[in-house]
Structure formats: C-alpha cells, structure tokens
Image: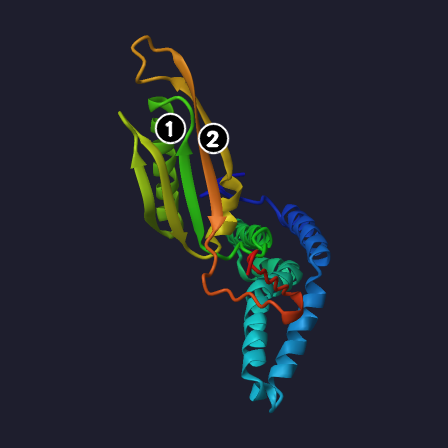
Amino acid sequence: MSTTTDIYEYRNKEELLRSASELKSSFDARWERNGIEGQLAELQDLEDLMAQPDFWDDPEKARDLSQKKSALEKKLIPWKDLHRDLQDFPELVELTLEELEDSDAAMHQLSSDFAQIEKRFEEVQLAEALLGKDDGLNAIVTISSGAGGTESQDWAQMLLRMYTRWFDRRGFGYETLDLQDGEEAGIKSASLLVKGESAFGYLKSENGVHRLVRISPFDSNKRRHTSFASVHVAPEIDDEIEVNIEEKDLRVDTYRASGA
C-alpha cells in the first residue's frame, strides 16, 4: 500500500468494491433521510409548471417559482450526479481493469476516481449543513476583548488576523465596519462585514467566548495568563424587507387632554 497526495491506494478490486459499497450505503441513508426523492419530484413539478404557456401571466409568482427552482437545482444536482456515479462505479471498476493491462496502474486510477467520489460526498454533506434560513447570507463578525486589558486585547487582535486570513483562503471579501485599537497593544473590538456565498452559514459556529492560555509576552515574570475574547456572528439582513400589517391588527387609541 502507498499513498499519493492523501489518496489511499487500494490493493485489489475486492477491497475497493467493499469501500464503494460502504460509501453507497451511507449515501443511500442520507438520500432517504433528506427526502431527496421527494424533492426531485417537486423539482420536476416546477419544471412542468414553468413549461406552461401561461406561466408568466403572473410575473411576481413566476419569479418566485423560478428562484425556488434554481435553489432546488443547485442543491439536488450534486446529489443526483453522485447517486448515478455510485451506481455505476462497480461497472467502471470492471471496465478499467479490462482496458488497462497493468493492474497497478488500473488500481491507481480507480483509487483516484474513488477519492473524488468520497470528496463529493463530503461536499454534499457540508452543503446539507448550510441549509438554515439565513445560512446563505453575508455575515457581520464582531470581536470584543474580554477582561484582562492588554492580554485580552492582544488575543482579540490575534483572532482578527486568523479570521481575515481564513477569509482570504476561502475567497470571501470583507470590509472593516468598526475598529477600536487597544491602549498598549491589540484591539478592544472590531466589526467586519464578510461577503461570500454562505458566509453566515460557515461562520455562525464561531459565536461565543474564545480562550487563550499562554506564557504572557507582556509579563516580565513570564507567568501563564488566560485571555478571553468574544465573537458574535450575525447575518446581514436585507434593509428592504417589507413588513405588512393588516388593518385588523391595528389598534388606535385617542386621548383628550384634561380640561379640554
């Protein structure tokens, strides 16, 4: 057995097919649990509806249904394609072993193909975890230093650097909304608007208090200090949201000044 760039090299066909069967069982369980079959039927119904000649007679309703269809397609197509490839994988194994005379080369190719399927399964599971109502929105991240003065302010700045580097690696854009420097080092607080697909979904788990235990660089006696900083993540809400209040839900009170 050898590994190449984190790809497990399967030794024989039986071992590979056993792993493929186990992966398919896990996939099928999630397929059923998430009701993918029913959602595919819903997508087909929408496609049939959009094919009707009077579909655009109500433009507002048509736009809503078109957006719903696009969202369903974005979610379901990776599931549908992966379902097909897992179904076809045993046949792919047989064909590859027949076409390539070198069995080692064939197993290397098949191991690479299967690693891609495993990666795609991880991706659909991650997407499954980002299906909350606000998960697709941009995020507002606020970092605040805790009690402890310079120690906590330095820790807050370290968190800020870690987050911004992660944003860069992820391809998220960000802008500083507010920044308060610390008195000696670090920052007292910072607020960032993070822009990118599912930014809030990825970052919402960072909510809470973050702790750092270290030998303080600010303590001449080199004692160990515990520093705290809080992180608050909120979705960026559309300012143009309209709230409709029906007249029957209103109550109007009138008063007369005394002596009038």
Measuring from the top left, give residue 237's x and y in whole percent: 48, 57
Question: Could you tell me which residue is drawn at 60 percent across and 83 percent down?
Answer: 50
Q: Which mark is residue 155?
A: 1
Q: How is the image coloured?
A: rainbow
Residue 58 or 66: which is nearer the viewer? 58
Question: Could you tell me which residue is drawn at 64 percent across and 62 percent down?
Answer: 83
Residue 178 or 222: which is nearer the viewer? 178
The answer to whether mark 2 and mark 1 are in CB contact below 8 A is yes
Quadrant of the drawing holding the C terminus: bottom right
Q: Secondary structure at mark 2?
A: strand
Mark 2 vs mark 1, CA separation in Å: 9 Å
Is 208 above or below relative to 141? above
Question: Could you tell me which residue is drawn at 39 percent across and 40 percent down?
Answer: 163
Assess disc 1: are there few (<14), some (14-19) or many (≥20) residues with their C-alpha within 10 Å of its C-alpha: many
Q: Amino acid at mark 1?
A: Trp
Q: Secondary structure at mark 1?
A: helix
Measuring from the top left, give residue 46's x and y in whole percent: 64, 77
Is 183 above or below relative to 116? above
Residue 216 or 123: which is nearer the viewer? 216
222 horizontally vs 47: left or right: left
Residue under label 2, please give it: 210
Question: Could you tell me which residue is drawn at 54 percent across and 77 percent down?
Answer: 63
N-terminal label among 2 and 1: 1
| Residue 228 occupies quadrant | top left
Q: Amino acid at mark 2?
A: His
| Residue 149 occupies quadrant | top left
Residue sticking out furthest to the left: 184
Q: Which mark is residue 122?
A: none
Measuring from the top left, give residue 41's x and y in whole percent: 70, 72
